Structure formats: C-alpha cells, structure tokens
Amino acid sequence: MMKPRYFNFYVADWMMGTLGLNNSERGLYITAIALMYGNGGPVAPDDLRAACRDHGNAFTRQLQRLINLGKLLLNDEGKLWNRRVETELKSIEIRCTNASDSGRRGAEIKRLAQATLKQSSSRSESEEEKIETATVLPFLVVNNENPTTPPPPAPAKQRQPARAAPDGAMEAEFQEWYKAYPVHKAVQQARKAYATARKTATAEVLLAGARQAAEDRKKRLEKGTAPEKASKYPATWLNGGCWTDDPEPEPRYRTLTNPDGNLYVDYGGM
C-alpha cells in the first residue's frame, strides 16, 4: 500500500469514537494510527512501544484495552492493524491513481486543442497569402505596358474558414459527440454550436472533452451537487470552449442513502 504524507483527520468522528478512552489510551491509539499511515500497513507492537516510550506495564494494559474494544486488531503476523486505516489507504491509492489518469487525459486534450488551433491559424494565413498574390499578379502583368496606371483597389481580405466535414459526416460526428456528452438538452442549439466549434477543434478533441465532462459530472454528483447544476448545457459547453478545461478534482466526500431512505454525507472520517 501507499505511504501517504498526510491523512484526513475528522474531529467529530475521532471525539465520538474515543469517548470511552482515557488520555493515555487516546495517546497510544493516535500514535498507532499515525505509525500505520506512515508505514502504509500494520505496525509491530515493539515499534509502537518504542514510539510511545511508556512504562511496560502501562503500555501493555493500554494496548490490551484498545484490542479488547476493537480499536486495534492483531493480524496473522502478530502486527497491529485498524480496519479504518486499511479502508482509507485503499481509498487514497484509488484517488491518486484517478487523479494521475485525469491529469494525463486533461493534458492530452489541451495538447490536441492547441495543435488544432495552431494548424488552423497557419492554414488560414497561407490561404490569405494566396488570395493576395492572385489579386496583385494579374495587375502587374498588364501594367507592364503602362507603368503610370495606378493599381485598382485590392479587395478586402477574407479569412477562409477552417476545413469542415461534409454535412453527412458532420452530423455523424455530432451524434457521436452528443451521445457521449452527459446532458441532452437543446439539441438544435447544440448542433449549431458543434459546427462552430469544429472550425477550431477536431472531432477527436471534442469527443474526448465530452467524455471527460461525463466523468466530471459523476464526480460532482458524488459531492452532492444538484443534477441540474452538475453540467452545462451542450451548446453552452461548446461555445465556452470547455473541452480545454481542467478535469474535476476527486471528491473528498460522497452522498449516500441510509437504510431508512434518508440522504447523508459520508466524509470517510476516522
């Protein structure tokens, strides 16, 4: 298991869970918990004794009471362990793994979006140069016979739109994107916004962003965010260029339902 540099300490849970302990037992208990997090696993009784520097009889009496109360457990190897610590360490490992994966996905989406914007800008500038050359060269050839003739005014430059997919292909791209995006509202506005977004981003970038938005919505709902506020409308998301946003951080708590059917917030405390 991982060896975290810190762990969440939930004061209310700690106070309620240690009401029946005296100060010495609390001190031994928190020391054992800290050693378990620091080791990333069970701790030997001798290591705990060395960390406490307590009198042998007092240490043995306090440790036995914590074991009798179920605060500490002895595993098959004779080491001290705690179920809550085991659960928290596994949760920390999962969160770190998910955060790392989300970071890599977010970085890849940004990289693709920036490359697409750069490619689109270079293509547009090249097309503008071709238009200007095609407009000026005919005049230069004709004007060789009469150098004093002033040049006619050049037409205003028009930025050429980025390459777009054919109508049929564009609709297929949109349908795949719309299916991946977590909110299905105002489809006509979403279709128009998608066509506009495709001028600066590839279909792959937009699709990857939609899938990340679906994961972000799931995390917000786990935090207890109201469903209608957990995600933007499709057109709003596209018009805002949200495919370049950072991923939603991992939730530090979740909303659950107890056996009576009532909702409560689980902070995963000690």
Image (cartoon, rainbow, N blue to C red):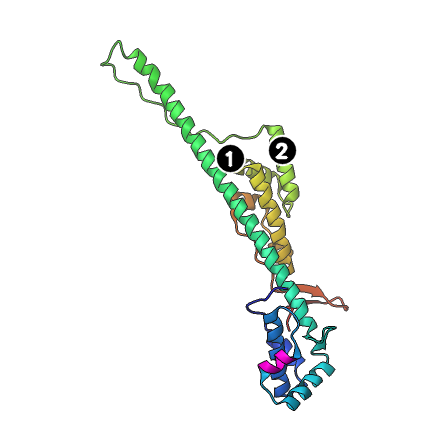
Residue 266: x %, y % from top left: 66, 68
Q: Which residue is mark 1?
A: 199
Residue 34: x %, y % from top left: 59, 75
Q: Residue at x 31, y 12 (%)?
A: 141
- Assess whether mark 2 and mark 1 are in contact (beta carbons under 8 angstroms): no
Under circle 2, the secondary element is helix
Under circle 1, the secondary element is loop
Q: Looking at the image, can residue 8 be seen? A: no
Dominant secondary-structure state across the stretch colored magenta: helix
> Which numbered disc flags the more N-terminal residue, 1 or 2?
2
Q: Residue at x 60, y 45 (%)?
A: 210
Q: Residue at x 25, y 14 (%)?
A: 149
Q: Closer to the camera, 152 or 88?
A: 88
Q: Closer to the camera, 79 or 243?
A: 79
Q: Which residues are magenta?
A: 46-51
Instruction: Give me the C-alpha separation between circle 1 and circle 2.
Output: 14 Å
The image's mark for residue 171 is 2
